[in-house]
């Protein structure tokens, strides 16, 4: 298994959503952890709803709405302006452990890489550049380029076009089983990063490759290519 290109999910795969903690601390104080948990539970399902209803709105807008809903549930006050300010933190999240090292090793192995994110183009560029990872990626692909969120097929289609190859020659790397399933249903191959959790396949879609995290991906790819 040597893909023509590797496309990485951003949020929760390369970057740590817990990095919103300080932003929430300033906005809601002691409600931080409860609001963060509620926000995380809402964010992705709400992007699915927007796509299914064909009512696309940019990721930061959905994030701000999810933050306000989570805050209300927790009994905290969070104004529209405060929620929008916290949502800006999504462009300044820290990379997860092992990301920088894993990407460097993949680059040494000659892999072409991209980010394929539900974020906006400007937000993804700011996130990757702020983390000092821009040089690792040929392409930064964002949902607002097609007006839909993963797992909509038009999002995954961007990867094949960017790498100028067939869908099956792209490997989508994600820590989310639903994302891997969406990629495989479109025709990409999928690698799941388990980070110590147990796989619960979505719609029976098993990943083509499994690694603990990004730092374990180069070895997993080499071993798969040797089979």
Image (tube, rainbow, N blue to C red):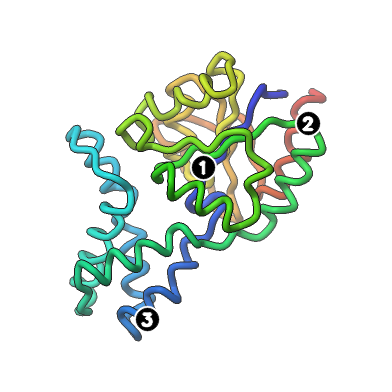
Q: Position of residue 207 (x, y in %)?
A: 56, 33
Marks 1, 3: nearer the viewer: 3
Single out the mark in the foreground, 2 or 1: 2
Q: Residues within 10 Å of mark 2 (few under 14, many from 20)?
A: few
Q: In the image, is 208 to the left or to the right of 56?
A: right
Count of numbered circles on the image? 3
Q: Nearer the viewer, residue 199 or 173?
A: 173
Above or below, comparing residue 217 to residue 153 in the picture: below
Identified at 48% across, 66% down, the residue is 18
Q: Secondary structure at mark 1?
A: loop
Residue 48: x and y, percent?
A: 28, 40
Measured as percent of width and height from the top left, residue 166 is found at 56, 14
Q: CA distance from mark 2 to mark 1?
A: 20 Å
State the image coordinates of residue 200 (x, y, percent, origin top left).
47, 43
Residue 103 image-quadrant placement: top right
Q: Nearer the viewer, residue 22 or 189?
A: 22
Which circle's residue, 2 or 1, is located before the other in the chain? 1
For mark 2, give the secondary structure.
Answer: loop
For the view shown, which residue lies furthest in the top direction? 166
Placement of the N terminus among the 4 image quadrants: top right
Q: CA distance from mark 1 to mark 3?
A: 28 Å
The residue tagged with tag 3: helix, strand or loop?
A: helix
Q: CA distance from mark 3 to mark 2?
A: 43 Å
Q: Which residue is mark 1?
A: 9
User: Outermost residue toward the bottom?
Assistant: 30
Q: Name the residue that disc number 3 marks.
A: 26
Q: Is residue 223 visible?
A: no
The first of marks 3 and 2 along the sequence is 3
The answer to whether the residues at label 1 and label 3 have Cβ atoms under 8 Å apart is: no
Question: Which residue occupies 27% across, 72% down?
Answer: 82
Whether residue 32 sits left or right of residue 173 in the image: it is left
Give the residue pinned by disc 2.
110
């Amino acid at each position: 298994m040597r893909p023509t290109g590797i496309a990485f999910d951003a949020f929760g795969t390369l970057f740590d959503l817990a990095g919103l903690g300080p932003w929430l601390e300033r906005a809601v104080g002691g409600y931080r952890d409860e609001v963060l948990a509620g926000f995380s539970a809402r964010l992705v399902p709400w992007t699915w709803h927007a796509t299914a209803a064909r009512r696309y709105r940019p990721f930061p807008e959905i994030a701000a709405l999810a933050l306000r809903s989570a805050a209300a549930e927790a009994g905290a006050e969070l104004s529209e302006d405060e929620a929008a300010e916290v949502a800006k933190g999504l462009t300044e999240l820290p990379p997860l452990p092992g990301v920088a090292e894993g990407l460097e090793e993949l680059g040494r192995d000659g892999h072409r890489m991209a980010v394929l994110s539900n974020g906006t183009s400007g937000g993804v560029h700011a996130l990757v550049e702020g983390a000092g990872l821009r040089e690792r990626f040929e392409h930064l692909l964002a949902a607002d380029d097609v007006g839909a969120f993963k797992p909509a097929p038009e999002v995954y289609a961007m990867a094949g076009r960017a790498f100028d190859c067939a869908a099956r020659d792209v490997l989508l790397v994600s820590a989310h089983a639903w994302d891997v399933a969406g990629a495989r249903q479109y025709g990409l191959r999928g690698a799941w990063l388990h980070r110590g959790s147990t796989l619960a396949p979505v719609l029976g879609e098993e990943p083509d490759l499994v690694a603990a995290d990004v730092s374990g991906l180069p070895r997993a790819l080499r071993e798969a290519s040797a089979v």
